[in-house]
Image (cartoon, grey):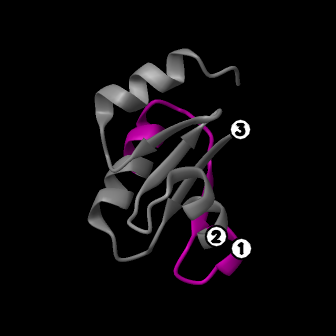
Amino acid sequence: MIKVYSTPTCPWCRKAKSYLQSKNVPFEDINVATDLRGREEMFNISGQSGVPVLDLCGNVVLGFDQQAIDDALTTCKQ
């Protein structure tokens, strides 16, 4: 499962989600501005409070790092 922890006002979050959509990769978008449980989950897996945080089948990518996303997706079983 792929999760994107984001906020509505974050431009890098939008880029990350657009990139996944352009690759036809389904994901769950978790708005950590309003979802306390999602915010805690994001912090637990990343140690970060900044967004975006992507959980790509257990591979955590901080920020919009296209190469890291592509690398993580190669190990992801959809």
Comes first in the chain, label 1 or label 3? 3
Does residue 21 belong to the magenta stretch?
Answer: yes
Comes first in the chain, label 3 or label 2? 3
Mark 1 = which residue? 37
Mark 3 = which residue? 1
Marks 2/1: CA–CA distance: 5 Å
Q: Residues within 10 Å of mark 3 (few under 14, many from 20)?
A: few
Mark 2 = which residue? 40
Q: Which one is in front in this view, the residue at disc 3 or the one at disc 2?
A: 2
Q: Which residue type carries mark 2? A: Glu
**Element on which disc 3 rests:** loop
Asked if labels 2 and 3 touch by Cβ distance under 8 angstroms, the answer is no
Q: Position of residue 27 (x, y in %)?
A: 62, 45
Which quadrant of the figure contains the C terminus?
Answer: top right
Marks 3/2: CA–CA distance: 18 Å
Q: Which quadrant of the view contains residue 8?
A: bottom left
**Magenta part of the chain:** 18-38
